Image: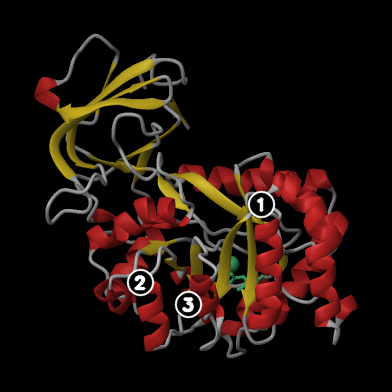
Amino acid sequence: MVSGSGRAGRAFLLTNIGELTTNVAAPGDACGTLRDAAVIVRDGRVEWVGSADAAPTDVPVVNAEGRAVIPGFVDSHTHLVFGSDRAAEFAARMAGESYAAGGIRTTVAATRAASDDELRARLAALVGECRAQGTTTLEIKTGYGLDVETETRLARLASEVTAEVTFLGAHVVPAEFAGRGDDYVELVVGDMLDAVAPHARWIDVFCEEGAFTPTQSRRVLEAGRAAGLGIRVHGNQLGFGGGAALAVELGAAAVDHCTYLSDDDVAALAGSDTVATLLPGVEFSTRQPYPDARRLIDAGVTVALASDCNPGSSFTSSMPLMIALAVREMGMTVAEAVWAATAGGARALRLADVGVIRPGARADLVLLEAPTRVHLAYRPGVPLVRTVWKDGAEV
Ligand code: NIG
Ligand code: FE
């Protein structure tokens, strides 16, 4: 593009934006939509937002030529560090087999066997895939190591590419602890937590039939909190379970999946700061019913959308696909879905300076090859991300 747009530390004016989604809420418009707008970026941050007519012109110009600009996507739930994919399992599922949490153990074996360089190369490729599709903030979980050494490696590798690292030692009970789930939980909250916590910001647990009970989950989350980590929960994916209620009770930043929620769960979420993160790539890839986003939003719950990119239940990193599925299958409006994939993800990670385009925010911007954000759902499967800036630098 133009000189000046390529590196942090430089300034540029992005102007002639046909539709700018700022996510600075205006009455009746949570997306804070501006027409014929402009943004000035300086030193990796947004410096100025306003009308194209009023924009200062003393910096290099990038002309959006009437296209739409949105905040970079905030993908608040991924599992990007792992040793091999599970294409055969997916094919078998599409031939009629059902999804079970136990498939995680297949990836654990491959991940333990992989070298750091192999894991790092796969992770780098996936991060590149995310960036190219407009994701500028990424959360990454451990959870395919399930022993002290491998969980620590995964957290360290994830921390090389993001500050949002989540310790998910309690993903499933590994084969060597079969029938001894409580003993495994003691390892997770003991030596494993001690080793991983320095590399992580969050702790997570898969609170589900076939993984960890609510009692075990509480033990894991409370230990993580005592070690200084923030709380997130995988819950209510495969059935009505205690994950959502536990997340609210412990003040978790988010409970993720939320496919099966009771009325009490919805009421508890609505009265809390816990974000319900919906992961429609999972329902797409496991042939489960989609979560009812409309019910959650109408009840006043804050909803985020994330990819859950992982080799088992959702091997896609595409946030535009999540938006399209949420709109088509989950009762969300386009504006709600775009907000949930940007500002909603930021809420789920308790980050104030991403998912929003206002002075002082990180200059994480996506220029779409489209005149409006509506096209993200209206043209499913079409690559509409034209240019991505992360911290003011073109990706
Ligand atoms: O978020 N639900 C638990 N964990 C992942 C699936 C991991 C796997 O199947 O490998 C998820 O869907
Ligand atoms: Fe997940």
Instruction: Tell whether label 1 touches label 3 (CB within 8 Å).
Output: no
Give the labeled residue for mark 3. Answer: 283
159 on left or right of 16: right
- Residue 6: x %, y % from top left: 44, 21
- Tag nearer the camera, 2 or 3: 2
Q: Does the residue labelled 1 lie within 8 Å of ligand 2?
A: no
196 on left or right of 183: left
Helix, strand or loop for disc 2: loop
Residue 232 visible at all: yes
Helix, strand or loop for disc 3: helix
- Tag nearer the camera, 3 or 1: 1
Give the labeled residue for mark 2. Answer: 271
Crowdedness near tag 3: few (<14), some (14–19) or many (≥20) residues, C-alpha within 10 Å: some
Q: Residues under labels 2 and 3: Cα distance?
A: 26 Å
Q: Residues under labels 1 and 2: Cα distance?
A: 25 Å
Which residue lies at the image location 87% right of the left edge and 78% below the top edge? 177
Q: Which amino acid does label 1 sit on?
A: Gly
**Front residue (pair 329, 2):** 329
Which residue lies at the image location 85% right of the left edge and 87% below the top edge? 179
- Residue 201: x %, y % from top left: 63, 49
Give the labeled residue for mark 1. Answer: 228
